[in-house]
Image (cartoon, helix red, strand yellow):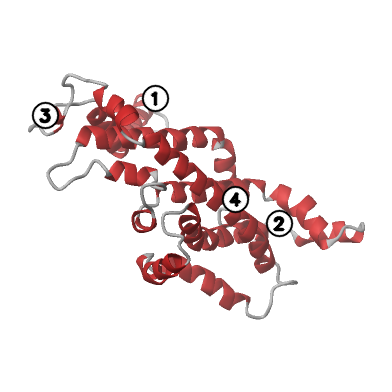
Amino acid sequence: MTANNPAARRFLYILRTLIIWVFVFIYLFPLIWTILLSFKTQVDALSYPPKFFSKLTAQNYYEVWNNSNFLQYCLNSIIIAVSATVIGLLLGTPAAYILSRRQYSPKGSKFLLFGVLSTRVVPQITFMIPFFIFFRRLRLIDTHISIIIMHLTIILGFGIWMMRSYFQDIPFELEESALIDGCSYFGAFRRIVLPLAGPGLATTAIFSFNYSWNEFLYALILTGIKTKTVPLGVYNWVSYEEINWGGLTATAVLALVPILIFYSIVQKGLVRGMTMGAVKG
């Protein structure tokens, strides 16, 4: 009956559209509310019931931009996130390739994969005390190097598992053909495998960069005045007496801008990479 009734089909289409928009609004409401709070005074932010459309002001952004070290925090986050992402790809991609090829993998490859996975399973705080003592003895506290190393403990494991799934989807026959044509193993990897795994590299880089940019625990413990990152810049607006909601949300919104720009640039590669890396039915 419904298939032959245009009015019923239109009603179902409108109903589905409304339901989708309701879920989209629920999903985006925290972000919308954060943006609104960033333009409110402290009095309006704490008012009850909440004032959604009270007088808006850009004073919070002025204070963040001129009266805090936000630009320095951004520079530190960029240095740490880019370095950790690049090093993670350089080290994790060859390891993932070897573990994806049974022809080259050792008999203990499953044990190695379990060890790599354990870095994602074990709570981050577990590594904190021994690494803190280690970095303090080497005088690496309040340096970019210590944060990059700690981020690599997570990024490497994640990158190896991600890239391994992409390499497994690439037929080994393509590499065999290159070897028959006189190409070396490294040449086949560089000229054949890596271009085909490009979307996977982009996806892994995006998730790795996003983790490093937003990581808070290691930065809180290992950084000082010189190397504070963006998440700590957000946390600076929290004090014992009160929480400056305007400054906090304004900093959070500004911290989203580099990530949104990065996502908009590589959006096609991200979607394609996630599709290629999906589990085959």
Q: Give, as a three-letter code, the residue at label 1.
A: Pro
**Is label 3 in a helix, a strand or a loop?**
helix
Q: Earlier in the sequence, mark 2 or mark 1?
A: 1
Q: Does 97 appear above or below 258?
A: below
CA gap, disc 2 and disc 1: 46 Å
Q: Give, as a three-letter code, the residue at label 3.
A: Val
Q: Which residue is mark 4?
A: 86
**Which of label 4 and label 1 is nearer to you?**
4
**Which of label 3 and label 2 is nearer to you?**
3
Q: Which image quarter: residue 217?
A: bottom left
Q: Give, as a three-letter code, the residue at label 2.
A: Ile
In the picture provided, is 124 more to the left or to the right than 248?
right
Q: Nearer the viewer, residue 14 or 224?
A: 224
Can I make out residue 279 in this image? yes
Q: Which image quarter: residue 121?
A: bottom left
**Is label 4 in a helix, a strand or a loop?**
helix
Q: Which residue is mark 3?
A: 43
Q: Quadrant of the N terminus?
A: top left
Q: Position of residue 170 (x, y in %)?
A: 71, 56
Q: Which residue is mark 1?
A: 6
Q: Position of residue 202 (x, y in %)?
A: 59, 45
Marker count (numbered): 4
Q: Position of residue 211 (x, y in %)?
A: 45, 51
Q: Earlier in the sequence, mark 3 or mark 1?
A: 1
Q: Which residue is mark 2?
A: 170
Can I make out residue 20 in this image? no
CA gap, disc 3 and disc 1: 53 Å
CA gap, disc 2 and disc 4: 23 Å
Q: What residue is at 53 percent from the left and 63 percent from the top?
A: 157
